[in-house]
């Protein structure tokens, strides 16, 4: 480590920050000045350049999950450039391209942490709206600076543009992890993807990059052209068309279900081969009905998955850079964020909003 690239934690200076925050359950965001903690000996501080907008940001801004703490600065798809590193930081230097995803802390001692699954640690700390080790509340990436323990920082390869890298830190790892863990990453397998939104379109891209045959399953016939021509899926099924479903019965090795709305699982289970896997990564507000007989008839399983650990997140970013997996994004200015939230409610985005923090936050908060 070059000493000139390190500022010792003993300086104990707070990192002033500017961002946008929700003040109450209306979910409306507005300019907000605050301070991040001083850069500790194992911390990395970086200038935020881009931050993706996840649908969960909208849920949290409006306290729809009953766990929000105001003022709330959303954002867990955060990328930028390192400006300061603590005295004991080993992996990063000033100027490095880095990112932070959904988690910024864990216990480091439980079985999950020991197995590089910090995301399943019972004491994991979310990137925003959670209590950190020091008792402070975490603030997310809708702001111009970020400070995080180096363990929860990922390196962004030089050939991966930062704006498209941002959504990979949530949407990307959410679909990459189950494809890998459940063995759906083998060339020649036939994988279904339910839903063609922010998660679904990235799932199609990763599965194709892994060599799988991909079928998109959607309630919207209008998405067929997009799925087949733009995303280069191999086939398309309308989930409400019984003839199409019957024709594809028993053809899929696995399904990644990205839908967060109420929807029937029975038709999806019918598409699986024996020993097939239906993996849920969406989070419907109400419980889904699980029919048992389709599981018995073919030893099929229903599984779940939630983002990924830090080791796997770095692996995912490196894979995306190597195989040119890039989310489709719409880059916006910070002051457009409330309009973007309204458009997300209407599914009016292809497929992920990314805020140009570096060029627009200071201008709107100074």
Image (cartoon, grey):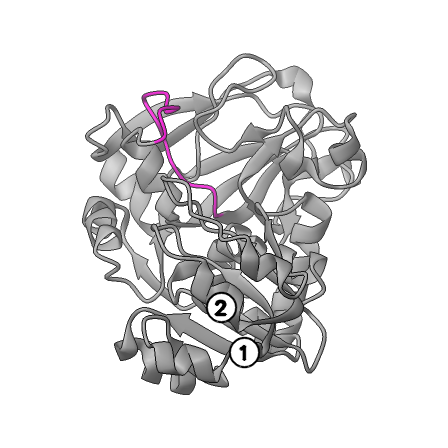
- Which residue lies under the disc numbered 2? 193
**Residue at x 57% of width, y 76% of height:** 250
Estimate the x, y position of residue 151 in percent, counting from the top left: 70, 37
Estimate the x, y position of residue 232 in percent, counting from the top left: 47, 84
In which quadrant is the N terminus drawn? top right
Q: Residue 1 carries which label?
A: none
Estimate the x, y position of residue 202 in percent, counting from the top left: 49, 66
Q: Find residue 245 and report its image quarter.
A: bottom left
**Residue at x 53% of width, y 62% of height:** 256
Q: Does the magenta stretch include residue 76?
A: yes
Q: Is residue 37 magenta?
A: no
Question: Left or right: 98 with respect to 170?
Answer: right
Labelled pair 2, 1 in contact (Cβ < 8 Å): yes
Label 2 CA crowd tier, 10 Å (few <14, some 14–19, many 20+): many
Instruction: Give the residues in magenta.
Output: 65-77
C-alpha span from label 2 to label 1:
7 Å
Which structural element holds mark 2? Answer: strand
**Quick one: 333 or 302, which is closer to the camera?**
302
**Residue at x 33% of width, y 85% of height:** 225
Indicate whether 243 appears above or below 285: below
Magenta stretch, overall SS: loop
Label 1 CA crowd tier, 10 Å (few <14, some 14–19, many 20+): many
Question: Left or right: 238 with respect to 208?
Answer: left
- Which residue lies under the disc numbered 1? 214
Which structural element holds mark 1? Answer: strand
In which quadrant is the C terminus drawn? top left
The answer, for residue 325, to whether it is visible in the render is no
Q: Point out the tag, 2 or 1, that comes first from the N-terminus.
A: 2
The answer, for residue 56, to whether it is visible in the render is yes
Indicate whether 317 appears above or below 46: below
**Quick one: 9 or 159, which is closer to the camera?**
159
């Amino acid at each position: 480590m070059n000493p000139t690239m390190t500022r010792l934690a003993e300086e104990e200076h707070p990192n002033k920050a500017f961002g946008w925050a929700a003040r109450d359950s209306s979910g409306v965001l507005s300019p907000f000045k605050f301070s991040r903690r001083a850069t500790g000996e194992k911390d990395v501080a970086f200038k935020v350049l881009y931050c993706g907008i996840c649908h969960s940001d909208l849920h949290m801004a409006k306290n729809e999950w009953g766990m929000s703490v105001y003022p709330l600065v959303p954002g867990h798809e955060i990328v930028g450039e390192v400006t300061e590193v603590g005295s004991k930081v080993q992996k990063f230097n000033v100027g490095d391209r880095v990112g932070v995803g959904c988690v910024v802390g864990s216990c480091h001692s439980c079985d999950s942490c020991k197995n590089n699954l910090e995301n399943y640690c019972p004491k994991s700390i979310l990137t925003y709206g959670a209590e950190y080790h020091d008792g402070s509340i975490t603030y997310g990436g809708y702001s111009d600076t970020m400070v995080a323990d180096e363990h929860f920082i990922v390196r962004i390869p030089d050939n991966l543009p930062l704006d498209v890298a941002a959504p990979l830190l949530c949407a990307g790892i959410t679909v990459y992890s189950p494809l890998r863990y459940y063995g759906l990453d083998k060339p020649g397998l036939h994988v279904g993807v339910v839903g063609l939104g922010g998660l679904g379109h990235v799932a199609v891209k990763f599965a194709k990059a892994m060599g799988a045959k991909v079928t998109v399953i959607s309630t919207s016939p209008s998405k067929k052209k997009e799925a087949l021509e733009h995303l280069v899926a191999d086939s398309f099924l309308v989930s409400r068309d019984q003839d199409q479903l019957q024709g594809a019965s028993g053809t899929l090795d696995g399904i990644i279900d990205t839908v967060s709305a109420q929807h029937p699982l029975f038709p999806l289970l019918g598409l699986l081969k024996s020993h097939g896997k239906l993996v849920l990564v969406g989070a419907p507000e109400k419980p889904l009905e699980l029919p048992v007989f389709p599981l018995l008839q073919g030893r099929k399983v229903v599984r779940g998955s939630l983002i990924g650990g830090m080791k796997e997140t770095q692996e995912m970013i490196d894979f995306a850079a190597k195989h040119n997996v890039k989310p489709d994004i719409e880059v916006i200015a910070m002051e457009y964020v409330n309009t973007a939230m309204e458009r997300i409610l209407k599914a009016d985005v292809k497929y992920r909003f990314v805020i140009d923090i570096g060029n627009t936050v200071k201008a709107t908060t100074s």
